Each structure stands twice: as structure tokens, then as C-alpha cells.
Image (tube, rainbow, N blue to C red):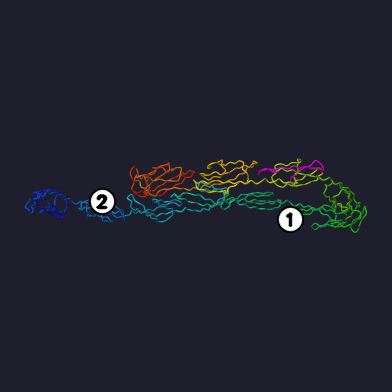
Amino acid sequence: MQRSISRLLGISLIFMFHFADAQTNLTVTICSGQSYSVGNNNFNTTGMYQTILVGSNGLDSIVNLNLTVLPPVVNNVSATICSGQSYFVGNFTYSSTGQYMAMLVSPAGCDSIVNLDLTVLPPVQNSVSATICSGNSYYVGNFTYSTTGQYQALLLTPDGCDSIINLDLTVLPPIQNNLTKVICSGQTYQFGNTVYSTSGQYQNQFVTPGGCDSIVHLDLTVLPPIQNNLTKVICAGQTYQLGNTVYSTSGQYQNQFVTPGGCDSIVNLDLTVLPPLQQTLNATVCNGASYMLGDSVYSVSGTYQQVFTSFYGCDSTVTLNLTVLPPVVNTLTESICQGQSFALGDSTYSMSGNYQELLLSTNGCDSLIALNLTVLPPIQSQIDAAICEGETYSFGDSVYSVSGDYQQILTTAAGCDSIVMLHLATTQAMTVSSQSISPVCAGQTGEITLDVSGGTAPYLYSLDGILYQDQPSFFNLPPGTYALAVQDSNGCTATLADIIEMPAVLSLAFPDSIISIVSGDSITLQPSANFTVDTFYWQPATGLDCPDCWEPVAKPEKSTVYQLFAYSEDGCEVMAALRMIVKSSRRIYIPNIFKPDRDGLNDTFSLYSDGQVEQIVQMHIYDRWGNELFADKNLVPNTLGSGWDGRYKGKPMSPGVYIYYFEVLFKDGSSHKYSGDVTLVR
């Protein structure tokens, strides 16, 4: 028997059964609020149902239904977000505090209800008033402030929300105080812990109760003792009072008083007590003249005395010693040359003899002059002189160069004629030759030896005509031209010139005296010489691939001065220097992203270089809040697996941006620090 059964399950389904009295087992799941139909029966609760259907052919069809009604899915969610953020539930977006219900569709197609209790945290605002001293700083998070003002710093709370700090900062300036003090000489002034006793401007720094600097400027004046000098003159028998003291004798006295300001005032008194003045006059008058003293006139030699009153009112006694002069008699002894004359008064004399004249003296008295006159005859003398051959001899106004006898009439100091006879002799000339030895190498010296014939031995020898020696050879002479001289025992000199030749100039050089290379690079040194090099050596040999080669390859780790010492076939040494400046090229690579997924590629984060790095002294990784996640030291660069693997305490860190810090030691001995950020991705 063939039957056909249809049922509607939300959609039309047709079941064809080709059997008699067939049974059908159905397991169906529907959502809450839906129903499931079998024939004319509708089911909407979970359970086991059986329905017998009759087909058009009259055969029964039994349907066994195992129905499950899924309840609505309800999820309760409590969430907290920061102000300005949003919270997403399916396609729904929420950004304010409240309780919300969102109806979603589960993977089974049923309703899914999400009950959201959302809290939106407002920005945290804190107001801070702070006072610091000048030169100090105030810290808010990573922000530093050192000047007065109002500031706003945006920080992150532990929840990751914004935290706004409003800072009202006052920076107190150093307190400046000026003190002006005056003390007396010998007193002191204490300023802080220091005691001053001399005038000057001083400065001390104190600390206020608030801990700030307080600068005090002291202008201190130390008054010296006031000195007054008095000069007084009194007569003998009188007194002078200074303060409470009475003085009656000459002397220098000192009294000390106190000024209204309390300082010492010293008065120095120079007192002169004049004795009765005693003055003696010695006077001279001519015979027949007179001398007036006061109201008296004296004309006879003698001693006279009168009493007068001085300028200060004291007695002044004048004693006069009067001399009446007789006529003056003077004797003159004079000499003149033959043919000259001597004038005395109105008379003239030209012959030796004794003469007298009566004249008027300078004091107006008669003067009798007695003259003893001598007339000098002409003077005769002889000179014997010798000169060297080729020299001349000056005699009076004449010059002679040939042996012979000569005569000159000269004038003596007295102005008379002097007849001088000259006997002149000329000595034999000297012949001088020299032999020189010049140096071979630069820096060496030569020598010169002189040979003399003629003249009169012994001889003296000179290189410059100034300093002489008794040896004919001169040693340790630098190259140059020398003016040689020989002097015999008669003082005659012969000169000649000789030359110490300059040795050949040996040149050793590099194309450039200064070369700059980058650390790790190398360069071939190419010296050149203008002489045949016998031997050579380099100093230092450090960094040279072949220290015994003429053109080695240099690869120094640091700046170095290379010296090349070369020797000629004559043994002369020449040196050339080359300065190699090694510039540090820090070829450092630090990745800005890595993915620790253990695929063998970019699994660890570290620092890489081209071989210049000796070691990574220390390495640190921090999160954005400054928490240290990784630290290691003394790492070998470019080592597989060396560095941070993206974990903290064994757990993988979330993708994000992290801060790194490296301290690196280079092979040239220098060190450098590197910091920045790296992005971790998963």
C-alpha cells in the first residue's frame, strides 16, 4: 500500500512513504514562542508526541515527534568604560551609564537577550596647589614643572581612563635682603656663622623656614680711628692744654677721645716750645764802611748783642760778630804758550815774571793781585808704531800705510804746540786656507780646519771674527757660510769664508697626512720617498695587515697616528706621519615590530649590528605604564633566540606598543644608549 503524508513546519515539507502503516520518528528543535505542526496538531512545548495520520489511500501513518523548545538565551553583562568610549553589543552601541537590553539572534536562530549594566566613568579631575623653591622642579606623572603657573596634566588611571590633574604651581624666588652696617676699627660683625672685621661687601646664603634660599647682602664699613694732627708753637715758660693734659715741653703727644658714634678719635699734637731765640750774625764790611743792627751802627770789628721781640712774641737775642776787612791780597800762578799774552786788569803780559795789580774784589773791597807768570816753550815727543800689511795708521790729520818716519805739529791740552815724531813699521801679511767636511744626513754637523802661513806666531782662530780660540779646528758646525779669521801675536788679522754644505734633502711623505675612514673599513697606505730606502719600519703596527710591507693595509679600530721610519743607504733616518681618523658609524638595527608566533621568523626582539658591537650591556622592556616586563645583561648581539620573546612571567603579552632601552658597548671602547618603542603583533 502506498501512502503520502504532508506537514508544514514553518516551511512546506513533503514526506513520501511507500510502505503500509509506516512509522516516522522526528527529532525537532524550535525556539521559544514558535510551534511545530504535525498534521492538524501544533506543538510548542518540549516533549514526546505521537500523531496518527490517515492518507488519501486510507492507510495509517504514525509520526513520533521528539520536540525540544529552546528557551530564550539571556546574558547579564556588567561593563565599565571611560568617558568618550563606547560599548558594543552586537550591532548596538552604548556610550552613557544605564541598563540596556539588546535582542540578538543566536547561532541556532533563536532570540538571545543581553542585559547590559553599563557604567561610564567620568574623567578624574584633581586640583593640586603646590609651592616650590626657585631651582627645584615639581613632578606630575612624567611631566616636570619649574616655573610659576597653572598647568593641566593628562594621565591614565589604573582603569586606563583619563585623569586630569590641575596644578596651581608657585615658584618662590630667592629672598634678597640688603644690610648696611658701620662698626669701629677693632670691632667685629657676625654675619651668619662668619665674623667680619674689614670693610667690604659680603654675601651669605641662608635657608628660610620653608626650605628656600635666602640671600643676604652685607655692606660693611669699618670706620678707621679718626686722626687729627695739631701743630702748636709756644714760648718757653708757656703751656698748652690738650684734653685734660697740660704740656710745657716740646714733643709729639697723642690723646685718645671718643666720637659721638662711639669710635676712637686720636689727636696727634706736635708741640714746639720755643726757647728764647739766640741768633748770631757774622758780618763783614770793608775797611772804612759800617754795619747797622737795630738802631745801632758799628764800624769796628767786634761782638755786639741786642734783644728783639719775635713773630710769636718771644724774646729774640741777636749777637753780631762784625769783621772789618782790610784790603785783599791774592796771588795768581799762570802759564801761557810762547807767543801768547796774559791780561790782568788793564795790563797785558807776554814774558815770564812776577807782577802786581790793585783791583776791586767781588765784595766791593780793594783787592791786591800778585801774578806769577810762566811762558811755556813748544813740546817735542816721539811715537813708535807697527801695523799689519794692508792696514793704515792715523796720525793727526794724516793716514799712513808704508813704513817710515813722519812728523806732526799738534796742540796740547793747554793749547800750546806739540811736535810729535812717528816711527811706523809694517809687518808681514798672513796666508790662510781652510778645509771643511760637510754632513751627509739632515741633522748632522760638519767641521772646518784652518791652515796659516806668514805673520807672527802664535795664532788665534775665529769662526765669526769676534770670539777666538787657540785651536785651528772647529767641530759640530751646522750647514751654512762661516766668516773665518786668524789673528797673529801682533794683532794682525786675515779673513776668509768657507761653507758647510747642506746635505741632500730626503723626502718621505704620504699623499694625504690626514685620512678619515669609517669604523670597520680599511685603506692601503702608500708612502713615497725621493731616495733609495735601505730599511724601514712602522710604528705602531696595530691595525696593519703586514707591518713589514712598504704599502700595508690599515684597519685600525680607533683613530691612530702611524709613523714610518725609513733609512737611506747612508744610514740617514727620515720619518713621515699619517693620522687616520676613525669615525664611528653606528650601524645599528632595532626592529620596530615583531611577531612572536614561534614560526622561526622574527620571534624575538633584540638589537642587531654589523660586528662593531662588543656586547649589549643591558636590555630592558617596559609597558606604557612604566612596568618592567623584561631585563637582561651582557648579551651577545646577533645571537639567535637572544632577546625578548614577547612574554612576561611565562605568559604571552597582548599585542600593543612597548618601550625598549639598550646600553651598548662598542669594540672601540665607547658606549651608547638607545631607547624607543616596538610594536608586538600576534
**CB atoms at circles 1 and 2 under 8 Å apart?**
no
Q: Residue at x 58, y 43 (%)?
A: 564
**Separation of marks 1 and 2 at Cα, in angstroms:** 128 Å
Q: Which residue carries the number 2 mark?
A: 78
State left or right for residue 514 relative to residue 455. left
Q: What's the residue type where badge 2 is placed?
A: Ser
Q: Position of residue 141 (x, y in %)?
A: 38, 50
Mark drawn on residue 227:
none
Would you identify the image quadrant in which residue 168 lies? bottom left
Question: Dot 2: what SS?
Answer: strand
Given the current orientation, which residue lies at the most extreme left position?
Answer: 58
Q: Is residue 331 visible?
A: no
Q: Position of residue 249 (x, y in %)?
A: 69, 49
Q: How many marks?
A: 2
Q: In this rendered view, identify the residue nearer to me: 251 or 64.
A: 64
Q: In this rendered view, identify the residue nearer to me: 441 or 329.
A: 441
The crowd level at tag 1 (other Cα within 10 Å; few <14, some 14-19, many 20+) is few
Based on the picture, tell me whether residue 345 belongs to the magenta stretch: no
Based on the picture, tell me whether residue 449 belongs to the magenta stretch: yes
For the record, the magenta segment spans 438-463
Q: Position of residue 201 (x, y in %)?
A: 54, 52
Question: Dot 1: what SS?
Answer: loop
Q: Position of residue 328 (x, y in %)?
A: 87, 54
Between circles 1 and 2, the one closer to the viewer is 2
Q: Residue at x 54, y 41 (%)?
A: 546
State left or right for residue 463 relative to residue 547. right
Q: What's the residue type where badge 1 is placed?
A: Ser
Given the current orientation, which residue lies at the most extreme bottom position?
Answer: 346
State left or right for residue 624 relative to residue 425. left
Q: Which residue carries the number 1 mark?
A: 310
Sequence-wise, which precedes: disc 1 or disc 2? 2
Would you identify the image quadrant in which residue 290 lies? bottom right
